[in-house]
Image: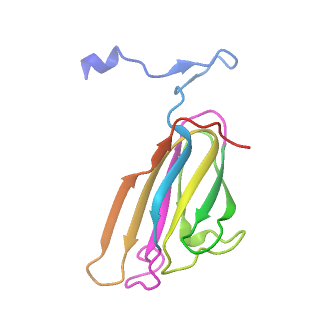
Amino acid sequence: MECLAHFNIMETNPTTKQKGFPPVGHRRWVIAEGYIPGTSIGPKPAMVSHETACVLNVSEEDAHLEITIFYSDQEPIGPYKVTVPARRTKHIRFNDLTDPQPIPRDKDYASVIESNVAVVVQHTRLDSRQAENALMTTMAFADTETVMMR
């Protein structure tokens, strides 16, 4: 721990004179694999089969996300709009996204998540179709080369 005491990752904001984290993450993320099982076993809501984007926003500004869903057999749907407050994390269950329309169960999809500020996105799936549940998680793909937000 002693060597960490000399390493300060907090930066001073020249406008507010307050310390905060430097930008972490990217403004566009891709989850190329998505699937919400149509059935679940176990208590609701915790054990309902679901897909989640876990989003971390360390900035001093709210992250306004736009999520677009892509399918193999139809045009993309979106944007689904979600806000992650400044210096907070939010777990966004794709099961709960309803506007512009609910994401269908038992259908493959992919998603692109765009933000006005840099964020970190992790993808998690809980498959509880049987008593032996399956949980998987992976980091989303960070697009580092494009200009964000139209």
Q: Looking at the image, how many numbered discs can be counted on the residues? A: 0
Residue 127 placement, left or right of 146 = left
Q: Position of residue 29 (x, y in %)?
A: 53, 48
Q: What segment carries the magenta color?
A: 36-62
Q: Which residue sits at x=47%, y=75%? A: 36
Residue closest to the eye, 126 or 78: 78
- Which quadrant is the N terminus positioned in? top left
Q: Is residue 34 above or below residue 141?
A: below
Q: Position of residue 37 (x, y in %)?
A: 44, 79
Q: Is residue 135 above or below residue 112?
A: below
Q: Is 58 colored magenta in this rendering?
A: yes
Q: Quadrant of residue 75?
A: bottom right
Q: Position of residue 43 (x, y in %)?
A: 41, 82
Q: Is 28 colored magenta in this rendering?
A: no
Q: Which residue sits at x=58%, y=64%? A: 70
Residue closest to the eye, 65 or 2: 65
Residue 27 placement, left or right of 138 = right
Q: Is residue 73 above or below residue 130?
A: above
Residue 14 placement, left or right of 112 = right
Q: Quadrant of residue 72?
A: bottom right
Q: Is residue 49 above or below residue 6?
A: below
Secondary structure that dominates the magenta span: loop
- Which quadrant is the C terminus positioned in? top right
Q: Position of residue 46 (x, y in %)?
A: 44, 73
Q: Which residue sits at x=48%, y=73%? A: 108
Q: Quadrant of residue 41?
A: bottom left
